[in-house]
Amino acid sequence: MAGLWNMRRTARPADDVAAGEWRRGWPIVAAAMLGSGLGPGLYQNLSSLFVPGLERDMGWSRGDIATAAGVGMIGALAAPAIGRAADRLGVRPVVVASMLVLALGYLWLASVAGALWHYTVGVMLVVLALPGTSSLSFGKLIAARFVAHRGMALAFGTSGLAAMTVVVAPLLGVVIDAYGWRAALVAMGVASLAVALPPILLAIRDAPLAEAPPAGDAAPAPVPPGMTAAQARRDPRFWLLIASAVLINFATTGLVTQMVPIGIERGLPAAEAALLLTGFGVSAIAGRILVGVLVDRLPAFPVAGSIAIVSAAAFLLLGWAPGGLATLLAIVFLCGLMNGAENDLLPFLAARLFGLRAFAEIYGTAMPIALAGSAIGIVGFGRLHDHSGSYALALAAGSGALLLAAGCFVALSRVGTGRG
């Protein structure tokens, strides 16, 4: 009995620390959920709902649409500058500016005419808003408030996108059927400003702005521990981490942006094909929570590698397994696990490996390179379909990319620990 009492007494301080993290940090996690849920990632996840309408009304092929969207990913090149702004000016002004740009992007997309460049500009504006509404901004706040439960906090913070994908996909399908795809884009723009932004600003009202320069003889504020962005770029772990993100984004973004056409091609009616997006969103939530729980307790790199292998196998199954809604939903669920894992795993590893001193700038430096994988996936899946007449080749390429990502995690486990 004495031994059990001592174990409980020893465990209590750690439990109290974890509980204190959640008491102080839950508003930031809630803000991150809204920012990711109604941010630019939602359009990426639901963009395949707009493909049939764009094909019909604009006369563009799936390859044309995918190429125009892929070129629009050039907006991610602003991520390092946005990261520096978040480190120096604070998260709040970056979030406000990003949400305004996002709403402008939706309105621009809703007004596209027959020129593909018009669509590209709209996607570019949406992508430009991504850093300020993602883990680049909110991950910095979460990592500063959570240590014992950092993985779980990031998992919940980034799960907003997956949750909104589950909820909004069928609703948006109804809006498109009733009022057209342009009205659906306007609705998404209104939601980003009217639904997401006010509660986000309320939740982060106490978040510190950039450290003010010392006044008079006052001592300078302490610098958070960790590397500068330049130091991180010289670390081989930085490039291995980016390589894994490029490969994961190629596979998962290529898949989700063609999800509805894939379902239709596998024999599903359009309404049932839209449900595949719901399955993908549910799997992303599961992936985030699963990874969040595991990386708080186990070495992160083997966890990531194992999930990547499971998703790689599911990509192959999606191309060749028998059709039917239930079967395809189960396969899509497994495909989406790595998408859910990647969004909270990368900020977790970035904070763990490189610290918080220049977290947003480091993450911002990595983001445009990682999103190049998304661009290649968007263009590649569409063009491979046009070239081969089916999605089997694209899905096989996605499977191979995920296996290579698992190899990156294995290499990371040898040069740096996922815990520490």
Image (cartoon, rainbow, N blue to C red):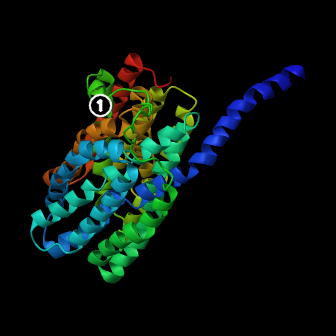
> Is residue 312 in view from this perspective?
yes
Instruction: Please tell me whether residue 275 is drawn above or below residue 20 in the rendered image.
Output: below
Residue 76 x, y percent position in the rendering: 23, 48
Q: 69 or 123, which lies in front?
A: 123
* SS category of the residue bearing label 1: helix
Residue 165 placement, left or right of 228: right
Residue at 31% across, 53% down = 130
**At which x and y percent is residue 184?**
33, 74
What residue is disc 1 on?
229
Residue shown at 40% from the left, 76% from the top: 174
User: Outermost residue, top direction?
Assistant: 414
Amino acid type at image mark 1: Ala
Question: What's the residue at 29%, 79% (across, down)?
Answer: 180
The location of residue 121, given as percent across then percent down, is 16, 61
Which residue in the rendered view is the most extreme toward the bottom? Answer: 178
Position above or below: 208 against 264: above
- Residue most toward the front? 216
Q: In screen coordinates, is 89 left or right of 389?
A: right
